[in-house]
Image (cartoon, coloured by chain):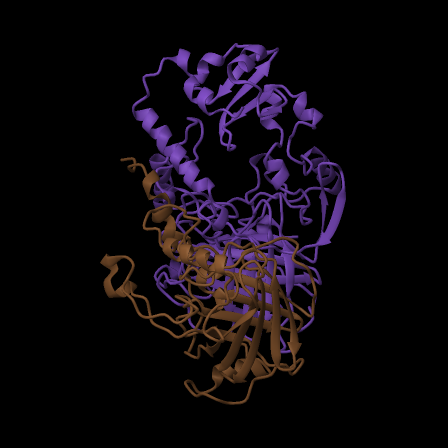
Chain colours: A purple, B brown
Amino acid sequence: MRSRTVIVPIAIGVVVWLAAHASAGQGQSEAPAFRIPTSTYTPPKTPWGDPDLQGVWDNHTVVPMQRPVNLAGKRTFTDAELAAREKARASNDPLCNQNDDRCANATVAALDVLPTYNGFWTPQDFVYDNRTALIEDPADGRLPPMTPEAVAIQREHVRLHPPTDPNSTEAVEIRHWTDYDLAERCIAAQVPTSTMGYNSAQYLMQSPGWVMLAHERLNTRIIPLDGRPHLGGTMGGWMGDSRGRWEGNTLVVETTSYTNKQSGGSVGASVPEGIPFGNFHVVERFVPMARNRIHYYVTITDAKTWTRPWTFMQPWEKDRVLRYEDNLGAVTTEPYQMYEYACHEGNNTMGNSMRGAQLALRQQQAPPSVPESETTKSLMGKTEAEIRALFGAPVEVTGPRWQYSTSNGILLFYAFFEKGQVVRVRPEDLRLTEIVSNASR
Amino acid sequence: MAVVMVALGAVATFQAPAYSQGGAIPRTSWDRKPDLNGIWQAFSTANWDLEDHEGGPSPVFVTGAWGATLPGLSVVEGGKIPYKPEALAKREENRRNALPGKPGRNLSADPELNCFLPGVPRATYLPHPFQIFQSPNRLWMVYQFSYARREIFMNGKSEAPIDSWMGWSNARWDGDTLVIDVRGFNGQTWFDRAGNYHTDALHVVERYRMIDRDHILYEATIEDPNVFTRPWTISLPLYRRIEKNVQLLQFRCQEYVEEFFYGEFVSPPRQ
């Protein structure tokens, strides 16, 4: 196990290295600032002599990129701590529905935190990892300090897209399609990807002179191994331009030439939102640890953004057998098979969401002069019988939440009841006449 | 840093003198089957229309000769696609709707216009290269257009668990010809910009036969009893891209249709 006393002099070395290479530009080899642990495992070979790492690799994880502040100094969990954490996590719940007693009996406050949507989508079968952070270097498991330039970029990004919650520092407001992150736009996941939430697999395919990494979501990376030069400029686009080589049994991939259009964030992103990654120099090291385990180390160098390079690691596991349980408790298992991820083809959400954002902004600027008595806000305090008398039966009841929709399934509004009376309604500014004329009967 | 020099076969094509043609079919070191590894492209106008088509003006006049239709001869054996009469009427309707001339996701337009996944066989003859990755018992194809891709199951008879845009592919060798049986399509793709189409009953059998080191004869037999009176076949050559350092480049066209899809929902930027 590494110790801090070893790391500190190395960290100083990094600063010296940065100063020495400040004008060298991209494409230089990495100085071994942080030493990637080696492995004694020898993988099988392909017929043409490369280590054979082919197959479906999953890196589904719950370990955060940065070590939470309350776990400072704690690098790993014990088995007992891991078991306790697992128990505390939500199970891979089916959607919260009418047949689910927890939903039916929930209070409004409890409903807010039930895994009604995301719990269904995020499987809880993680690749084993007992660490408290993905970041290995710096040794405190936290991102190194950002440069003043990068801090200013991030602040400006948030200022231009202010959060709705004044206590939040996350960019929220949408005015343009480029305000969505890359994954929401179905363009790419940032390279390197880290935590994907779901569909976290990648098929690693090899042919003589090439590696192809088909990520289950979005990215298809094609990596030549023949020593050709990088494309240069911004030709690498959203995923950057990757060149690979074998160092012993470790696949080493260097990526540069990213587009300079994008900022960070998005699902699977390895860097915080608002950080442009056009200046990234990324070195990935796929270290084979066992037949079905790779330790995937990534070192990101970007002197415009961070004061020193940093490295994170994710364990990858091959040939996992996944277990599915449906609403009725039936269990199926199957070897991990990646399916087509047609993201853009089904992306109705972005258009709807932009339309909503546009309407919200217009209302902010010129609130409609409809008296509250004519909007959904006036439903507060009404009884179940009164709501039924006004709009008929709800389309769906989820515990304390009644849903009304149009005949083609577009959500109109939710009313939340406690002790038989409406205590919350969303949205509050919908004209009652619109509901009466549109509601499904 | 060590350049990986591969022991046998496939990568030798990279070191071969550029721009020569002919030559023996490369074979894999592991099973002596034709080695299809490489970057390939159809130099064909089939994506405009599988059947005979004349050159024509751009459908959008401001794009002038840039947007013109390239002329080409039919790649369909016998020249014509054997449509059922009512299906031919639908093809004509598709042709009128192919380019709706108004913004937004338009599901009656050519799916290529929306940057939707191209399906098979269209992915093969889009005006973009694609790369074949072949290793023992594994085969993938990755297309430059939108990075569309297919995992192809070797010697498998697996059934499509669900319909998809690119279909579900099982392959086998018939002598030196790679035969890929593709089913499980969702019925939302077209064959070209001219409205030639199919339903989710589509069944495609592709045949890849190397005729020399740098050429594959590509054939696809298309069957869909909802639309056609009999199976029919297209054939066209695929050419190896032999430029030094050739690689697929980014064509994530999702980005190129964003203004088209979402332009009307933009709010002025915050100052």
Q: Is residue B259 left or right of residue B42?
A: left
Q: Position of residue A162 (x, y in %)?
A: 37, 32
> Going 36% across and 62% down the picture, which residue do you hit?
A25
- Reply above or below: A253 against A395: below
Q: Outermost residue, front direction?
A: B85
Judging depth in this view, the residue of A90 and B257 nearest the camera is B257
- Reply above or below: B178 against B156: below
- Reply above or below: A421 against B107: above
Q: Outermost residue, bottom direction?
A: B23
> Going 69% across and 28% down the picture, which residue do you hit?
A100
Count of numbered circles in the view? 0
Residue B2 visible here: no
Q: Position of residue B95 (x, y in %)?
A: 39, 58
- Reply above or below: A314 against B224: above
Q: Quadrant of the C terminus of chain A?
A: top right
Q: Position of residue A42 (x, y in %)?
A: 69, 69
Q: Position of residue A128 (x, y in %)?
A: 69, 49
Judging depth in this view, the residue of B107 and B253 nearest the camera is B107
Residue B168 visible here: yes
